[in-house]
Image (cartoon, coloured by chain):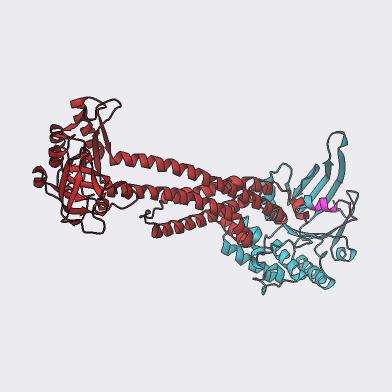
Amino acid sequence: MTPVVQMRGVTKVYRSGSGSRTVEVRALAGVDLSIYPGEYVALMGPSGSGKSTLMHIIGLLDTPTEGEYWLGGEPVRGLSEAQLARIRNQRVGFVFQAFFLLPRLTALHNVALPLVYRGLPLAERLKRAKAALEAVGLGDRLDHLPSELSGGQKQRVAIARALVQEPDLLLADEPTGNLDSRSSDEILGLFDALHRQGKTIVMVTHEPDVGARAQRIVRLRDGRVADGGMV
Amino acid sequence: MNPLENFRMAFESLWGNKLRSFLALLGIVIGVFAVTAMISLGQMATAGITQDLEAIAGRSIFVQPNFNEGQDFSTAPIREEDILALQTLPASVIPQLFTSAQYEARPGTRRSIQLQGTPGDLPRLDPTNKLARGRYFSQAEARGGLAVAVLSDRAARDLFPGREAVGQVARLFYPNGARLELTVVGVLQPPGGLFGGLGAAATVYVPNELIWNTSPTARKGQYDFVVLSLKKGADARQVTRQVQRIFEGRYGKGKYQIASTESFQDTLRSITLILQALLGAIAGLSLLVGGIGIMNIMLVSVTERTREIGLRKALGATSSQIRQQFLIEAVVLTLVGGLLGVVLAAGLLLLITATVPFFKVFILNPATVLLALAVSALVGLFFGVWPAARAAALDPIEALRYE
């Protein structure tokens, strides 16, 4: 089976300053990682361990300085900015800690947003968005603005927005970080359900009880995979 | 993503920020309003001037001797045979004489008044002369040199204050003291319009023949001035050239001054055109200021929507799609501003047409409207480029982290 995510020796070096005062920060120092279809993986590690950087590279928001990365079996190296954007749109569904819903758009239009960049006609976009909202249990909140929704509901809208893309990979960055424990349970329950439906999920978290719900935990330390890379 | 989608998004985001969008486009509204109003007012003024000029002078050609310095007043008069030659042209030929006379305003006080010789039946020959009361002496009466007169409105009021002039006898004196007693048979209407003042002189119209017979300076068969009132359909420029040829052929170049209302109109048109261009350029400055306002607001908007831009990029928007989005927003903003400006200008022009008598016709050329809208779209494009480029260049990771 082709892994959804396949990494070999991925490093990421950030340079700041200039000339002799250049400071190099090695955020990732040779990451080997495989994630297979249908897996539910928690990416854990202390702050500064490189888990955000790794998530950005997995989600094609950033590219490795060295090493190879295949997303869905295809190498990422050498792709243009526009090609990366297209692949993000088709293969990666993001769920953010702060939801990032556009405040002026209704739940339905927020969910339909990624499909704008596929050139789908409006009616088709809204049809798919409605189905995605129904799938996360918000079929009765289509025309609500984000300000009219609770935190848990907002995050469910955000998850619907990721699902509407039918991505190879759901990439969630601390999705319960802004939620109370009841809403957290609700959202984690939703991820469990999505996992049972066969979705591939990568969740970045620093909370052990959140990580514990995943099938596998990948621990990062000092820019390397300390445990769970499973290559 | 199709452009229509971009326009919808632009409207949504501008609508979501109504107050700010309105304030941002105010500069453009004022700029386009000013440019459109200036151009159209210029055109309306030209039309008004042209109409007024036609009302007082018709479509006419004027011939008079060129009085060069040191030259005797009567070295180059217009002669009877010149008039005969002019009568072959498609125009009514009205040879005239000018001289001045005096009248007794109060016992002991003499005032000057203009005495103008005409061939008679003037209102028919030149429709810009309209009778108010009485009649105009006929061509036969004129040829007979009868002592009859038609007064201009001003002359009637000066000579017979508070009385009906028709039927009275006007008593005039030549500068040498010779007396002239004229039976007043008619009074002309005062000329109207912008140039009304020019034609409002106190003038006593009498037969040419009478002036020849009585004036100490006039010589029989010589005229001071000829008006050719063009017949319908006659080409003013062509007839002007024919008149020129007649006089140059007989007397050589530069002896006579030949002008037409057409040439006055051309001069006036070029003056208003220059004024229009100047005022338009000044109004254009406000468009520039408006454009800078748009740029400012778009920059604020880009900063404020940093996270939106980051999100859109994460969801698969390319940099060029983001650039397009913000460019189109700027263009939509300025286009809406331009439309509002044109509507306001149209309102003002309608108001002016309705209230100011000089502006008789409402003119708003489609070309002017198109120009105004095109310029406002260009302003949006030009001043939107930089903010849009900043939006497109945002790093999605940084943008999503932005608080």
Q: Position of residue B224 (x, y in %)?
A: 21, 36
Q: Name which quarter of the figure residue B177 lies in.
A: top left
Residue A43 visible in rendering: yes
Q: Position of residue B179 (x, y in %)?
A: 17, 43
Task: Tell which of B202 and B268 is nearer to you.
Answer: B202
Q: Is residue B291 above or below residue B267?
A: below
Magenta-drawn segment: A44-55
Q: Is residue B131 above or below residue B99?
A: below
User: What hue represents chain B?
Assistant: red
Q: Position of residue B69 (x, y in %)?
A: 30, 26
Residue B314 visible in rendering: no
Q: Position of residue B369 (x, y in %)?
A: 45, 51
| Magenta highlight on residue A48 | yes
Q: Name which quarter of the figure residue B165 lies in.
A: bottom left
Outermost residue toward the bottom in this view: A140
Position of B238 with respect to A151 (left or right) is left
Q: Is residue B95 above or below residue B300?
A: above
Question: Which quadrant would the N terminus of chain A be assigned to in this image?
Answer: bottom right
User: Who's cyan, chain-wise?
Assistant: A
Could you tell me which residue is drawn at 42 percent across and 58 percent down?
Answer: B350
Task: Tell which of B375 and A103 is nearer to you.
Answer: B375
Position of B263 with respect to A127 (left or right) is left
Q: Is residue B199 above or below residue A43?
A: above
Could you tell me which residue is drawn at 83 percent across and 41 percent down?
Answer: A15
| Magenta highlight on residue A189 | no
